[in-house]
Image (cartoon, rainbow, N blue to C red):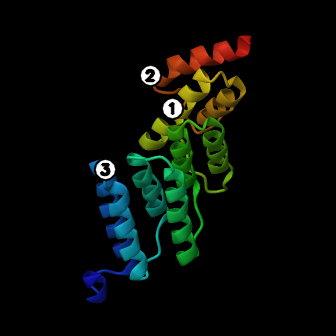
Amino acid sequence: RELLEAEDIDATEAAELFDGILFGIVQAHHPLSSSRADVLIKEMLDIGLQPTDETMRLIVEAKTLFAAPGFLIDLGQSVLEVIRRCDTVLKSSSLLAISGAHLRTGDLDAAYRWFLASQLMTDRQTLNDGPTLELVSQLARALAIGGRACQLKRLLERLKEDGRSKLPLNAAAVSLSGYTCGRSM
């Protein structure tokens, strides 16, 4: 706040600084990450900064770190509050993070729907970077274990379209066995 008021940094740099602090909160994997993120976001909104897509993704990740029962309600309220106050929209990476939150609760259908929504956006995030590929790998494993061959096939086709010919080995073995099992059912 003080740097912004002293005009040492502009609004874009301030938002990047807040994102960096939020990233540190998420990386710390502390049980209070969710409440610390809430405090930081409230401060960000109070000084009038516009959250970035990275901010939204980090909010979702902070809320899912040490998820208690009903955390999806808390997550939804936090995201909707930011959207309402800042007149912003969710982008592909935020939708992928929400997919991961649903996957964490075991709601495979919702996780897959949010994954599809992230891929239908015109400015969608490709599936090649590390954190995104990890989420896609988790989703592939869950689809394979759940015997969801058609959904798994679509996910793998999307991965291939993005120039990634295969999943990491730990996900590929489970996915292959699940896909084979699903095809024989």
- Disc 3 crowd rating (10 Å Cα; few below 14, some 14-19, many 20+) is few
Label 2 to label 3, Cα distance in Å?
A: 28 Å
N-terminal label among 2 and 3 = 3
Q: Which residue is mark 3?
A: 31
Q: CA distance from mark 1 to mark 2?
A: 8 Å
Decide which of tag 1 and tag 2 comes sooner along the chain: 1
Tell me: 104 left or right of 155. Answer: left
Q: Which residue is mark 1?
A: 137
Circle 2: residue type: Asn
Q: Quadrant of residue 45?
A: bottom left
- At x 51% / y 32%, what residue is drawn? 137
Q: What is the quadrant of residue 182 in the picture?
A: top right
Which quadrant, please, contains the C terminus? top right
Element carrying mark 3:
loop
- Vertical relation: 172 (above or below) 96: above
What mark, if any, has residue 170 been given in the picture? Answer: 2
The residue lying toward the viewer, choosing from 119 and 39, is 39
Q: Which residue is at the far front?
A: 69
Q: Are marks 1 and 2 in contact (CB under 8 Å)?
A: yes
If the image is split into quadrants, where does the N terminus sit?
bottom left
> Does residue 139 appear to the left or right of 170 in the view shown?
right
Q: What numbered label is drawn on residue 148? A: none
Question: At 55% across and 35% down in the image, what residue appears?
Answer: 106
> Of 129 and 64, which appears nearest the observer?
64
Whether 67 is drawn above or below 168: the answer is below
Q: How many marks?
A: 3
